[in-house]
Image: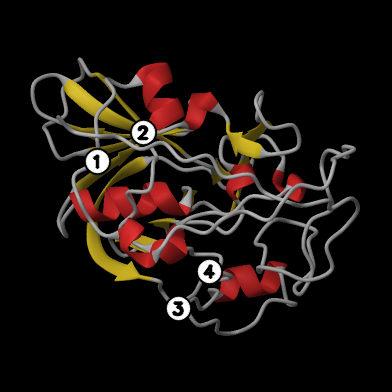
Amino acid sequence: MQRIVLSAFVTSSLMIGPVLAGPLSLNPDVPYGSRQAVRVQMQVQPRPAAVQPPPEAYAARPRPSFGGGFLEALFGGGLVRSDPRASSAYGSQDLGPGMVESPYSPGRPVVDPRYVRQEIAYEGKEAPGTIIVNTNQRMLYLVQANGRAIRYGIGVGRPGFTWAGTHHVTNKREWPDWRPPPEMLQRRPDLPRHMSGGPDNPLGARALYLGSTLYRIHGSNEPWTIGTQVSSGCIRMRNEDVVDLYNRVKIGTKVVVM
């Protein structure tokens, strides 16, 4: 009998007001070197520091299945992560459209259940292995066999930067470096010309490059923006989700954006 150990981690943070340093933001009106102001101000009681799991807890192994839906949202994450650096540590400053306050731990942000990765029924015409991006729904689907698909919550282009079309994955990068294109530098001259890969990089843990376009499906250091229109056209995901997608797709994968 397989034993499943569920560990509860309690975080300690009281962050009210703007944070003056942190990951680079690609969102409009957020200067380089600063982070967005707190979206929700709460009175949070100090909590004991979180106990960090040992390194071996992150070893790759089959992810337990709980059938999708609510149970998957509660228990599907566990300690099974293929890249420890891609595990998000959320603080009270991270509450936003893609995050909600935990009903069990006041002040602790958790992913909005709408955007939790889960397997669903699929009745479309695309072949297994195809990526479908539905910008209106703020969802990305990876089509599976037998009428199933894996659904991920995403962030999409802000008004004026959305697009549609069919491309293929032409490159894949882990913890990619980032070089803003000239068009972006014209809009954001405060951005660096180059940024090495890492947890603070706006491309996040993984990136899938789409044809000859400037667009990517990539991770994000701003998980609270999932479910919103905020990017310059790229499709952003939580780091945990983009690692999962990256491991499932190959170069040449068809990508349909609608």
Circle 3 — which element? loop
Count of residue discs: 4
Q: Nearest the camera: 129 or 204?
A: 204
Disc 2 residue crowd, few under 14, some 14–19, many 20+, Cα 10 Å: many
For disc 4, the marked residue is: 199
Residue 58 can be seen in this image: yes
| Residue denoted by label 1 | 63
Residue drawn where x is 43% and y is 18% of the image: 70
Inter-mark Cα distance, 4 to 2? 23 Å
- Select label 2 or label 3 by which is in front: 2
Marks 2,3: beta carbons within 8 A: no
The amino acid marked with disc number 4 is Pro
Mark 4 and mark 1: Cα distance apart in space: 23 Å
Q: Secondary structure at mark 4?
A: loop
Q: Give the mark toward the camera: 3 or 4.
A: 4
What whole-number distance in Å separates the C-alpha atoms at marks 3 and 1?
Answer: 29 Å
Q: Residue at x 39, y 46 (%)?
A: 241
Q: Is residue 148 left or right of residue 243?
A: left
